[in-house]
């Protein structure tokens, strides 16, 4: 019984507190660095707003699925039977856990991985953001630009892999978490920014709209001046 859930109970390579730092604080620091260089408040505002939406929505979806599915973690045996002595009901053959309730409850939250979903939600958004900022798809073949946008995804992938290595998740859990995070990140980015390969993909919609409005006002003002002089 529970032969596939007997992996050792151990700590986290990437602690829980580090996930918001990796998925939110680090990208926001990059947004801030670009702001100090370009002085575009619209870009900073929508970058921070977008990534917060991305991580928040992902967290809600992830926790809802965790509670609904209740899949046991790979180390569930040791959460259920800390002394290594398994106990089952003689009639129903159901598991009779005698571990700490909080530890057992946490052991039923394997699917999907919160570390993976949070990391990909934040760093996936950052990947979209950097793709637009450095014009990766400008058809000039700059491999260095491609390497830059791969770094956030690689970091998120390493966080996800650590969860399997720590026996806190099955590989399906981290894969599902990554898909959820990337999907939400994509929707949230495109809610505030154009596609990175568009001609106006550098800045958010709000800034582009403002620029068009100012250009229209300037054009109208220029066309009216000769009439006023006559």
Image (spheres, grey):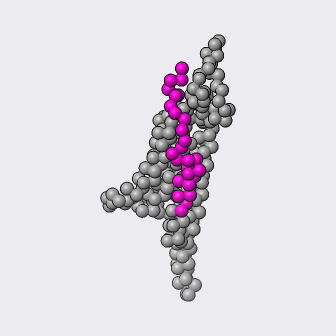
Residue 3 horizontal/vertical position (percent): 50, 23
The residue furthest right is 101
41 versus 221 height, above or below: above
Quadrant position of residue 63: top right
Q: What quarter of the picture does the C terminus occupy?
A: bottom right
Residue 93 horizontal/vertical position (percent): 61, 15
Question: Residue at horizontal 52%, vertical 79%?
Answer: 222
Q: Which residues fall within the magenta stretch?
A: 1-29
Q: What quarter of the picture does the N terminus occupy?
A: top right
Quadrant position of residue 65: top right
Residue 139 horizontal/vertical position (percent): 34, 59
The question of residue 43 being in magenta is answered with no
Question: Residue at horizontal 56%, vertical 78%?
Answer: 221
The question of residue 7 being in magenta is answered with yes
Question: Residue at horizontal 59%, vertical 50%?
Answer: 17
Q: Nearer the viewer, residue 157 or 181?
A: 157
């Amino acid at each position: 019984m529970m032969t596939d859930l007997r992996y050792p109970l151990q700590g986290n390579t990437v602690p829980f507190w580090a996930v918001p730092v990796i998925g939110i604080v680090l990208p926001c620091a990059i947004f801030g660095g670009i702001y100090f260089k370009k002085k575009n408040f619209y870009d900073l505002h929508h970058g921070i707003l977008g990534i917060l939406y991305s991580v928040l929505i992902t967290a809600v979806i992830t926790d809802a699925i965790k509670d609904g599915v209740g899949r046991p973690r790979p180390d569930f045996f040791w959460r259920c039977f800390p002394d290594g002595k398994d106990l089952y009901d003689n009639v129903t053959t159901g598991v009779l856990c005698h571990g700490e309730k909080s530890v057992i409850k946490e052991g039923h939250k394997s699917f999907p991985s919160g570390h993976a979903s949070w990391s990909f939600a934040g760093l996936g958004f950052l990947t979209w953001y950097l793709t637009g900022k450095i014009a990766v798809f400008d058809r000039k073949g700059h491999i260095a630009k491609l390497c830059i946008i791969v770094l956030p995804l690689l970091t998120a992938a390493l966080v996800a892999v650590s969860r399997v290595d720590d026996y806190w998740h099955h590989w399906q859990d981290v894969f599902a978490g990554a898909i959820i995070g990337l999907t939400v990140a994509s929707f949230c980015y495109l809610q505030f920014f154009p596609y990175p390969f568009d001609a106006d993909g550098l800045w958010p919609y709000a800034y582009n709209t403002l620029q068009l409005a100012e250009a229209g006002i300037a054009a109208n003002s220029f066309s009216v001046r000769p009439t006023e002089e006559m």
